[in-house]
Amino acid sequence: MSTPTAAPGTGPDWGAGPYADALRTGRGPLFLRRADGWLLPLEVERWCAGADTADLSALRRCEGPVLDIGCGPGRLLAALAERGHRALGIDVSAAAVARSTAAGGTALRRSVFDSLPDEGRWGTALLLDGNIGIGGDPRALLARTAELLAPRGLLIVETSPADVDERVRVQVAGGHNGHPAHTAEPFPWARVGTRALLRHAAPELWIPAGQWTVPGAAQLPGAAQLPGAERCFVALRRSRATVLRSRG
Ligand SMILES: C[S@@+](CC[C@H](N)C(=O)[O-])C[C@H]1O[C@@H](n2cnc3c(N)ncnc32)[C@H](O)[C@@H]1O
């Protein structure tokens, strides 16, 4: 499973342009940029480093085989492998998959909405680093993730420290203030705080199984994380109820 495999329908290609460049060098600055100029900093340096205390607070809770959705350069996969977990990363970016594999992880170039190995059998799914934003429709992503997990499987989501629930269209942008390089096509993204996530988690699919916060890491070059900002996590347990297919 460690060979990067392009699949149809991989979605917006984060792998081209500034994201691939940032993963190759391990450095930002990198942003999600909205048409009106609003910038959401992406913490490339942290993603390309080893798992930190906040990451480990999530990994400690993992049960059974772990699916890391939007695995990026693979720090979580490497840490899971060190701890003896069977783990698979999926990402639409070829650069992310290549870096994950080089870091000792197992990763596939797939969208979470594509057909995936072991659907309905994963013990834990991870949506960290804002990945609940993938696809721009948190309810659809939660429904898709429920299909991937085994009954009673665990989903760990990192939520926004802000009390937000927003859907946006963005481009990946690099360089000073998000200029000049950016991906060609805007794509949908979402930002979801803890309260919104719990609202989106349909009770017929999910049982809340915990929430916690961890003080943010020291500010990194190129990242606009405020000193003292927290990272916030929510665990949801898949109910035993039959999961409806989210795809045709
Ligand atoms: C906010 S970054 C998170 C990075 C990552 N968690 C890490 O550890 O570096 C979002 C990641 O999700 C990936 N992604 C975007 N859309 C995706 C999709 N539909 N399916 C799988 N991965 C996707 C991007 O390529 C990117 O690597």
Image (cartoon, rainbow, N blue to C red):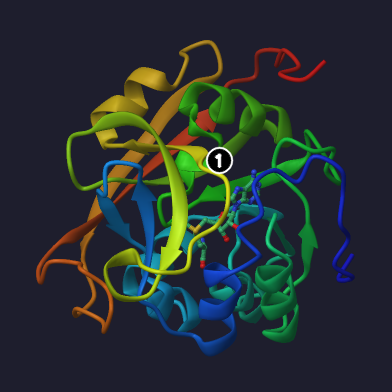
- Judging depth in this view, the residue of 119 and 165 nearest the camera is 165
Q: Amino acid at mark 1?
A: Leu
Q: Position of residue 115 (x, y in %)?
A: 85, 38
- Few, some or many residues within 10 Å of mark 1 (<14, 14–19, 20+): many
Which residue appears at 67% of the width and 84% of the height? 103
Of the pair 96 and 55, the residue shown nearer to us: 96
- Side of 208 where 216 appears, left or right: left
Q: Quadrant of the C terminus?
A: top right
Q: Is mark 1 within 8 Å of ligand 1?
A: no
User: In the figure, 108 relative to 185: above or below?
Assistant: below
Left or right: residue 24 compared with residue 64: left
The quadrant holding residue 54 is: bottom left
Q: Can you say whether 106 is above or below 199 in the image?
A: below
The residue indicated by pointer 1 is: 154
Q: Secondary structure at mark 1?
A: strand
Between residue 41 and residue 159, name the one nearer to us. Answer: 41
